[in-house]
Image (cartoon, rainbow, N blue to C red):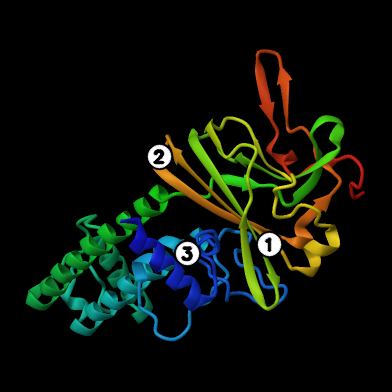
Amino acid sequence: MFFPIMKLDKLRERITGTKTSETSTDLGLGDKVARQPGTRLINNDGTFNVVRKGRSFFAPYQHLVEMGWGRFLLVTLVSYLLINVVFSVGFLIIGTDSLTNIDQNAPFGYRFLETFFFSVQTFTTVGYGTLAPLGIAANLLSAFLSLVGWTTLAIFTGLFYARFARPQRLIVFSDRAIIAPYGPGGKDRSLQFRIANKRDSHLINLNARVVLTWLENDRRHFAPLQLERDNVPLFPLNWTIVHPVTDNSPIHGWTEKEYCRRHSELLITVDGYDETYAQSIHVNNSYLHDEIAWNVRFAPMYFERERTTELHLDRIHDTEGAGEEE
């Protein structure tokens, strides 16, 4: 069983010119991507730095779920007003005499507002009883308006639930990774960054994976970084993720200039489970070579108090020690 797989791997290596061990660590990005210096693979918000062109598919549900809350509330309000304006115009076309308790001698603006408010009452199935349709045309339009109202309210109710229920980016990253002293006496070095849960929810079984990518000979290279600890069962405090720069490390002997010359980028994926919402979470992040601080340490961000521990999220970016920027 193993021989056909080995032959396929060798054939893939001969065709692509890339070793199988390298392709398994590129996180699915490939070595032909982002070969222009300064182009990052993953944005700070965790999204991929990819712009889709050409053929696209209209996916209104996805757009409404993923857009910001400000735009979503604006779309909801505009849709609500537009639907009722359209139906109020319909009642005006039929004639305001098809609705009870509307003064036919009143100005047009007053009669328009009356039909608009009747549309709102029918749309939301409130029905105060002051206004009512008369005749077949007005009753048919009112019936269709009720159907549109039920459908629209059901759709936006589902959208509100989906937006509240979808996994959120609960994990906050330090704004910089650091090269810090490591080991007894601080003689060795380590690459570190820090994460924390920004909400008071229960995250468990967190797994971290870190891959370093860099440009060399017009080709993008990938190398997984061995972590001091790649899993935490519980996550009540912050977690400093550490890669010891040992002799076996892909970045052993790299200087700050080499990080910059190779246009390196640190790719990070964190997976876990959110007990509060009973769903899995996945977070991406990255650090470019100029987002790495050298010869500093992370400052403490939690402190012992009487019968409790205080975690200061506003200190997740704080560093101290030699080489700290003033």
Q: Residue 67 carries which label?
A: 3
Please tell me whether mark 3 or mark 1 is closer to you in this view: 1
Identify the image quadrant of residue 251: bottom right
Helix, strand or loop for disc 3: loop
- Along the line of sight, which residue is nearer the eye, 324 or 71? 324
Q: Residue 277 carries which label?
A: 2
For label 1, the crowd category at 10 Å Cα-Cα, with few meaning under 14, some 14 to 19 and many 20 or more, is: many
At a point 26% along the width and 66% down the height, the residue shown is: 118
Q: Residue 265 carries which label?
A: 1
How far apart, in angstroms, are the residues tagged by discs 2 and 1? 32 Å
- Along the line of sight, which residue is nearer the eye, 191 or 62? 191
Q: Residue furthest left?
A: 136
Amino acid at dot 1:
Glu
For label 2, the crowd category at 10 Å Cα-Cα, with few meaning under 14, some 14 to 19 and many 20 or more, is: some
How far apart, in angstroms, are the residues tagged by discs 2 and 3? 21 Å
Please tell me whether mark 2 or mark 3 is closer to you in this view: 2
Left or right, 143 with reference to 236: left
Residue 122: in sight, yes or no?
no
* Among numbered discs 2 and 1, the one appearing first in the sequence: 1
How far apart, in angstroms, are the residues tagged by discs 3 and 1? 28 Å
| Image position, residue 237 (x, y; %) | 62, 31
* Among numbered discs 2 and 3, the one appearing first in the sequence: 3
Helix, strand or loop for disc 2: loop
Left or right, 63 with reference to 187: left
Helix, strand or loop for disc 1: strand
At a point 56% along the width and 55% down the height, the residue shown is: 284
Residue contact between numbered discs 2 and 1, judged by CB atoms under 8 Å: no
